[in-house]
Amino acid sequence: MRSFKKTGKALLCLVILFVILKLLDTALYPCTYTRNDVHTIATQQKDVILLGTSNGKMNIDPDLLLEGTGLSGHNLCAGGQYPVDAYYLARLAVEKQDPKMIILELDPAYYMMEKEPGNNYLLFYHEFPVSRAKLDYTVDALLGQDFRMLFFPFYEYPLSVEIPHMKDTFTQKVTGDYSVERLQNSRQAYHENGFIEKFPVSVENFPAYSPSLFEEEKVVEEDMGYLRKLVALCRENEIEIAAVSTPLPGGALHRDQAYFDAAWDYFGDFFAENEIPFYNFNREYFDAFSHGDDVFVDYDGHMNGDAARAYSKVLGTIMFQK
Amino acid sequence: MFGTTNGFILFILISLLLYYLVPRKWQWAVLLAASWGYYLYTNPWAGVFLLFSTVVSFWCAAVVGKTIRDAGDRKTGKKKARKILLLGMLLDFGVLAVLKYTGFVVLNLNRLFHSGISIPALLLPLGISYYTFQTVGYLLDVYWGRTEPEKNFFRYALFVSFFPQLIQGPIGRYSVLSKQFEETHAFSLHQIRFGLERILWGLFKKMVLADWAAVYADAIFGEPDRFSGIAVFGLLMYTIQLYGNFSGGIDVALGVASLFGITLDENFKRPFFAVSISDFWTRWHITLGTWMKDYVMFPLTLSKRMSSLGKKSRKLLGKKKGRLIPICISNLIVFFIVGIWHGATWSNIGWGLYNGVIIAFSSFFAPEYETVKQKLHINDKAAGYRLFMMLRTFILINISWYFDCVPTFGTALRMMKYSVTRFAPAELLAIPAGKLGTAYTPYALLTLGLGCLLLLIVSILQERGLHIREKMAALPLPVEFGICVILLICVPLFSPMAAARGFIYAQF
């Protein structure tokens, strides 16, 4: 009886601890646009899902891309999305709905870097609903990570920033508020279809440019492994897959031509071997859209909203032969 | 990574579940499987070296034990077994020496003879310095008759590979651990609670104190000339980093072992309350200190050569001073070994010898100190005098870290010079402390300051003989639970927003 009481008390302590951590997480972990993105693909049927990095996020508006095709789409790209994240996001999409096509926006730099621990994992993982994909993501990618990421995800965000928003964050999460108004700021606007519209920036205000230049010998095998897994997942589930490299500023391309050529050769061969259409706007489709600086908001290749919309139409015309 | 990954937590949970579910006589087998599983998972290739060391020391100890037993007379037996003992030690230390010191030797040969021998890139198996000392200690214990050789190879393998202590110590003794592995352990919530509290305290020291201090120490010692005006601050940060990291790691190891009902030797006893360098070494990395004392210092001091040296020195310097010479020389040798154990660099050797010289000097002039104290009517036990001694020791210890935290001897000397010639606290603001840059500096320093204050209060209470965890256990459950929850939440909230750094002492 005494031991039963003791065990009961210990279990009660664990439950209280769990509740405290859940409350802290609800109040201190911010509502990011990835929360909206993941919620959308976990709850709504979308025919076309875009995966990839910040260039995909800011350069492709799914509504304009799919205009006239009768297909629905969502832009699930995000800065910091490595192949491992793209793969598990695709797994989640397959588990929760029935996508017909996956478009992978390709930034070669992401294939030569180990994913840095911390926030980058949380950005996606934290928003996953309870699912088989989340379990596998945990085992595959999270076990080797710092315990704070799993149990105290709010640790990555400064208290000085999060405490003033605590009430809003808490209310949004508790009421299941996924409105996009709170995700706008002076530099960009997030749209419900996942597209981020960047406001124009004059060339003289472009931030400093220090790209990670592609070298084949630096390619991380683990990253390529997840790309192969993504292809296999699409094949297994009869999902069409295509790859896109969105236009980069001409100056940047010209400056590091040899590195970009090496990247396009490498990934061109990969996609050809796997019979995946690769829409490379920096080589084969170079002339299909402007590479002028005025189209972009930085030298990394993020477009301003108007240009991105125009580009999305061009991409849609080429991809779907409208 | 030991102690801080989700995988490690899962591994502990599974091991605990199995440990308390299997028939108790097989608990040790669960620990053995867990230890080897952990080691092979983290270092698949290094298992060969661990196995080699285990097999060699087990076999040699068995032969040594049998030879002594069969000889009837212990003295004759020891003489016969000596070769096997030496073979065992040679093989055990040999692997360590080749893997750890080849690069250092080749580098110095190249410098000395201007040769171009390529330096082999040998990887050091995790924990090799710890388990080698454990196996050699066991061999010597068997040889000296302090312990009987283990008959069961697998039980012995557990002693060598017990995972909580394998990576960064404490260096275990066979006589202490083998009994605990033989015993059965009933599930005890009390034990689990104690273990978790110890782990939590260790994580606080490691992740809040050491990891924040490391931000500053790394920046300052990484660019000593740029941050020359805050060299002293860098040194203090390094002290906090080293203590928080190492003692925090040991707390985690002791706490994890405690979850399985195993009590490991303490490795720290509030080292910065030490009143002399020799006192410091009875409080800092205690198990290395006692290992050195038992297996190097005493045998060396009592050896024939040292006896004859003692006789000669007594003739030359008189009875009092003369008898101190062998002790002083043994101390220097011990600290040379301690230095080189910490790493194959001249800086480490310099650091070891620095400690050895101070201890030897203090021992040699101890009678003179006593005379001066008596003449000045200094009361040893007065709080003021003790505080002065603590401060003096703290400064001497901090000076020694100069050799430890920079890669070259020359940089260490330069940092020493900066410490006394330049002072520009504003340079602190140039160190980005958080993801958003220097805005975090006051926050980081405040966190560190409060954390150190908490550590100081706890240390003072412990130094006064208060057993904090026992006191906590006597509190009403909600209060004890509340304290633990606050500490638990403090770790992620106040630790730097980055991945945890590794444990410094896991690289030995």
Image: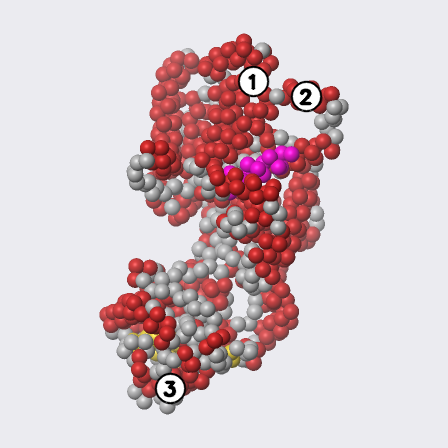
Residue that carries the numbered disc 2 in the rendered image: B370
Residues under numbered marks 3 and 1 in contact, where contact means CB atoms less than 8 Å apart: no
Label located before the other in sequence (2 or 1): 1
Please check whether the numbered discs 3 and 1 fall on a single chain.
no
Q: Nearer the viewer, mark 3 or mark 2?
A: 2
Q: What chain letter is assigned to the residue under label 1?
A: B
How packed mark 3 is, by other alpha carbons closer than 10 Å (few <14, some 14-19, many 20 or more), is many
Residue A48 position (above or below residue A123): below
- Residue B5 in percent (x, y) is at 48, 53
Q: Which residues are magenta?
A: B392-405
Tell me the tag on residue A313: 3
Which sits in the foreground, A38 or B324?
Answer: B324
Residue at position x 58%, y 39% in the image? B398
Residue type for callout 1: Leu
Tell me the tag on residue B474: none
How packed mark 2 is, by other alpha carbons closer than 10 Å (few <14, some 14-19, many 20 or more), is few
- Residue B184 in percent (x, y) is at 51, 38
Residue at position x 65%, y 54% in the image? B446
Residue at position x 41%, y 78% in the image? A293
Label the magenta part by its dominant secondary structure.
helix
